[in-house]
Image (cartoon, rainbow, N blue to C red):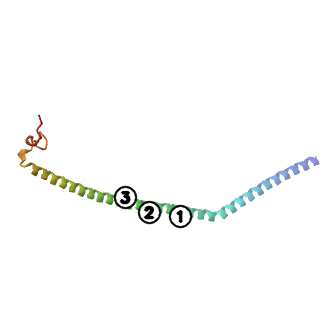
């Protein structure tokens, strides 16, 4: 009976030691996690600050790119307007030249009655006569 009591006491003591050992491991793990959290808290704040700086930089660059594109678009629009005005001026000059040449041709033909629109620019009396 004594040996049974001793065995029971030894078993209870082993369970206590096991529970104490488990408790010690849990405490050690908890302490290590807390220490790690404290050690990385500063770097997490630094990382957060760096991320905010990067976002600010991306936003700034985006705004600069938008401003540059707007400027280029305005320059291109101004250039197109200038070219359009030049082309309009050139077309106007050509039209004036054509009108002047038409007036010269009409003057060579004589009075307006000499021209036959059905026969072409020249009237029938100015057409070459067929040989024959």
User: Which marked residue is nearer to the observer: mark 2 or mark 1?
Assistant: 2
Residue position for label 2 = 64
Q: Mark 2: give few (<14), some (14-19) or many (20+) Cα within 10 Å.
A: few
Measuring from the top left, give residue 24's x and y in whole percent: 77, 57
Measuring from the top left, give residue 105's x and y in whole percent: 13, 50
Q: Quadrant of the C terminus?
A: top left
Q: Is residue 48 above or below residue 9?
A: below
Contact? badges 3 and 1 (CB < 8 Å): no
Q: Identify which residue, 53 or 121, lies in the foreground.
A: 121
Does label 2 or label 3 sit earlier along the sequence?
Answer: 2
Q: Is residue 123 above or below residue 71?
A: above
Does label 2 or label 1 sit earlier along the sequence?
Answer: 1
Q: Is residue 20 left or right of residue 124?
A: right
Q: How many marks?
A: 3
Q: Identify which residue, 7 or 119, lies in the foreground.
A: 119
Q: Mark 3: give few (<14), some (14-19) or many (20+) Cα within 10 Å.
A: few
Q: Identify which residue, 11 or 23, lies in the foreground.
A: 23
Measuring from the top left, give residue 29's x and y in whole percent: 73, 57
Contact? badges 2 and 1 (CB < 8 Å): no
In space, the residues marked 2 and 1 are separated at their CA atoms by 16 Å
Residue depicted at 21% across the width and 54% down the height: 94
Q: Is residue 87 above or below residue 53?
A: above
Residue depicted at 46% across the width and 60% down the height: 62
Residue position for label 1 = 53
* Label drawn at residue 73: 3
Q: Secondary structure at mark 2?
A: helix
Residue that lies at the very extreme toward the right in this rendered image: 2
Q: Secondary structure at mark 3?
A: helix
Q: Identify which residue, 53 or 2, lies in the foreground.
A: 53
């Amino acid at each position: 009976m004594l040996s049974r009591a001793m065995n029971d006491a030894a078993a209870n003591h082993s369970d206590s030691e096991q529970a104490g050992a488990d408790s010690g491991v849990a405490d050690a793990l908890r302490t290590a996690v807390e220490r790690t959290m404290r050690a990385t808290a500063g770097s997490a704040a630094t990382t957060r600050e760096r991320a905010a700086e990067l976002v600010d930089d991306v936003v700034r660059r985006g705004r600069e790119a938008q401003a540059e594109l707007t400027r280029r678009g305005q320059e291109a629009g101004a250039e197109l307007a200038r070219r359009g005005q030049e082309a309009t001026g050139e077309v106007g000059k050509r039209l004036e030249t054509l009108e002047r040449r038409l007036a010269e041709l009409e003057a060579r033909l004589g009075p307006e009655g000499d021209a036959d629109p059905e026969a072409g620019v020249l009237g029938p009396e100015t057409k070459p006569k067929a040989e024959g």
